[in-house]
Image (cartoon, helix red, strand yellow):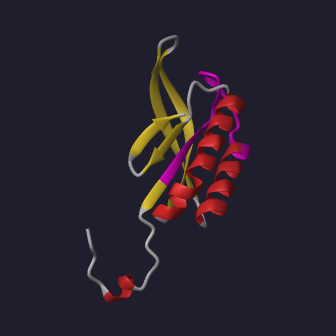
Amino acid sequence: MTINNAVLKNCLKLSSKITVYVPATNGIDQAADNTEQVKKTAALLSELFGGATSTPALGYWMSPAAGLVAEATTVVFAYAADAALQEHVGRVVELCEELKREMGQEAIALEINGEMYFI
């Protein structure tokens, strides 16, 4: 969609959004302080894309072993120019793999432009 506005035509447009869901558990359901992982994620997204925002969320998923699991999560996201996203997405995937190992997760959710990937 093209917005026809004189002021907006002269503004920087960031067309892409990249989001990392940082869990607040170790393993399946052991509560953990994710403050350092959220800071690390926000710092990387800010370095790569110029800024980041975080917000708390409560996620649910079905575990074959434990049934319905409610999990506190922090959603960290950044808006980016398409070229910057293409250039740096590999570093964000590496971060997700690192978070997965650190936190003993089955997967870390990474959302790019509305599409979800489980790393």
Left/right of residue 5 with respect to residue 46 in the rendered view = left
Identify which residue is drawn at 37% across, 82% down.
8
Q: Is 72 in front, or is 63? A: 63
Picture mark count: 0
Residue 50 makes an appearance in the image: yes
Identify which residue is drawn at 51% across, 56% down.
86
Identify which residue is drawn at 63% across, 60% down.
48
In the image, residue 77 lies at what x, y percent?
A: 53, 54
In the image, residue 43 lies at what x, y percent?
A: 69, 56
Residue 17 vertical placement versus 94 (above, below): below
Identify which residue is drawn at 60% across, 22% down.
29
Quarter of the image holding residue 62? Answer: top left
In the image, residue 66 lies at what x, y percent?
A: 52, 13
Instruction: Tell me, yes or no, whether the highlighted magenta stretch contains residue 31.
Output: yes
Q: Is 21 in front, or is 93? A: 93
Residue 111 vertical placement versus 97 (above, below): below
Q: Is 114 in front, or is 70? A: 114
| Position of the N terminus by quadrant | bottom left
Residue 78 makes an appearance in the image: no
Q: Which residues are magenta?
A: 18-36
Quarter of the image holding residue 100? Answer: top right
Taking the view exactly as shown, the residue that stands out farthest to the bottom is: 6
Residue 88 vertical placement versus 61 (above, below): below
Left/right of residue 10 with respect to residue 77 in the rendered view = left
Left/right of residue 35 with respect to residue 87 in the rendered view = right
Quarter of the image holding residue 2? Answer: bottom left
Instruction: Tell me, yes or no, whether the highlighted magenta stretch contains residue 66.
Output: no
| Position of the C terminus by quadrant | top right
